[in-house]
Image (cartoon, coloured by chain):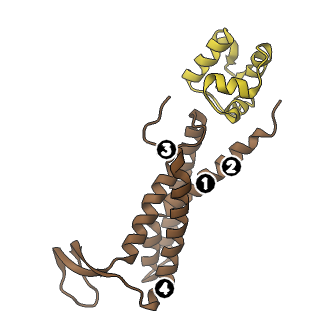
Amino acid sequence: MKTSYLFPHRFILPAGIIFIISLLSLVLYTTSLNDLGLSLNTPVFAIMSDDVIGADPVYFGTMENNIIDELLILAVILSGIVLAFAKEKHEDEMVANIRLQSLAWATIANYGIITFCYLFIYGLPFLTVLMVAMFSQLLIFIVLFRYKMVRFYNTLQHEE
Amino acid sequence: MKNNIKVQRAIQNLTQQDLAEKIGVSRQTINALEAGKYVPSTVLALKLSRLFEKPVNEIFQLEQGD
């Protein structure tokens, strides 16, 4: 059985490195480095924008924006997708089964967490929740699947 | 569902690794199959049947509750 939607196995290592670096940078940037005045203001195309500080709303036009967080999110999501859906070294039907199970559990856990946060977090901190929710499912899935694969590979010991 | 892959493998004098390579899965998958932790697809069951030269029914049996 051939699966066509998975990325080649050799992408795992580079995608993993980019994922960890960009995720850490994103967390650092949004939590503390934001205050350092580090910015990369560039004219961008916006479908819709409404500046809280009182600038005119923009529809299908250009505007100035700091694009550091956009670039970091792009790196996190692209590398995360490749890392999450790359072939294993010995891809077979049991690996596919473990992947499906991990994906189901990650989805359930993710929506559990989001529901919990929706019910108990209010105001501005909820924006952080929404931000994290953009890639939390991917993150939970990657961690869960890797953990299950490590356990699967370790069953090697008890043979015959 | 239970199976006697371990017995069939012993008859053919194959290690888990040999069997895994012959039917194109990982050794861990054979291990999970023998331990009854994983139910294979029809394709894999037929491959095992062809390799052992036994009908699928002789390798895999339904259990109560299946």
Q: Nearer the viewer, mark 3 or mark 1?
A: 3
Percent coordinates x, y for residue A54 in the rendering? 23, 90
The mark that comes first in sequence, 1 or 4, is 4
The mark that comes first in sequence, 3 or 1, is 3
Asked if both marks, 4 and 2, belong to the same chain, the answer given is: yes
Residue B31 picture quarter: top right
| In the image, residue A79 above or below residue A120 | above
Q: Nearer the viewer, residue A155 or A38?
A: A38
Q: Which residue is mark 2?
A: A150
The mark that comes first in sequence, 4 or 3, is 3
The mark that comes first in sequence, 1 or 2, is 1
Q: Nearer the viewer, residue A34 or A8?
A: A8
Asked if both marks, 1 and 4, belong to the same chain, the answer given is: yes
The amino acid marked with disc number 3 is Pro
The number of discs equals 4
Is residue A151 shown to the viewer in this render?
Answer: yes
The amino acid marked with disc number 1 is Leu
Dot 3 and dot 1 residues touching (CB under 8 Å): no
Q: Which residue is mark 3?
A: A8
The crowding category of the residue bearing disc 2, from other C-alpha atoms within 10 Å (few below 14, some 14 to 19, many at least 20), is: few
- Please, what secondary structure does the residue beneath circle 4 have? helix
| Label 1, label 4: how far apart the Cα atoms are | 30 Å
* Chain displayed in yellow: B
Is residue A109 shown to the viewer in this render?
Answer: no
The crowding category of the residue bearing disc 4, from other C-alpha atoms within 10 Å (few below 14, some 14 to 19, many at least 20), is: some
| In the image, residue A28 above or below residue A151 | below
Q: Nearer the viewer, mark 1 or mark 4?
A: 4
The amino acid marked with disc number 4 is Leu
Q: Is residue B28 left or right of residue A144?
A: right
The amino acid marked with disc number 2 is Val
Q: Which residue is mark 4?
A: A33
Q: Nearer the viewer, mark 3 or mark 2?
A: 3
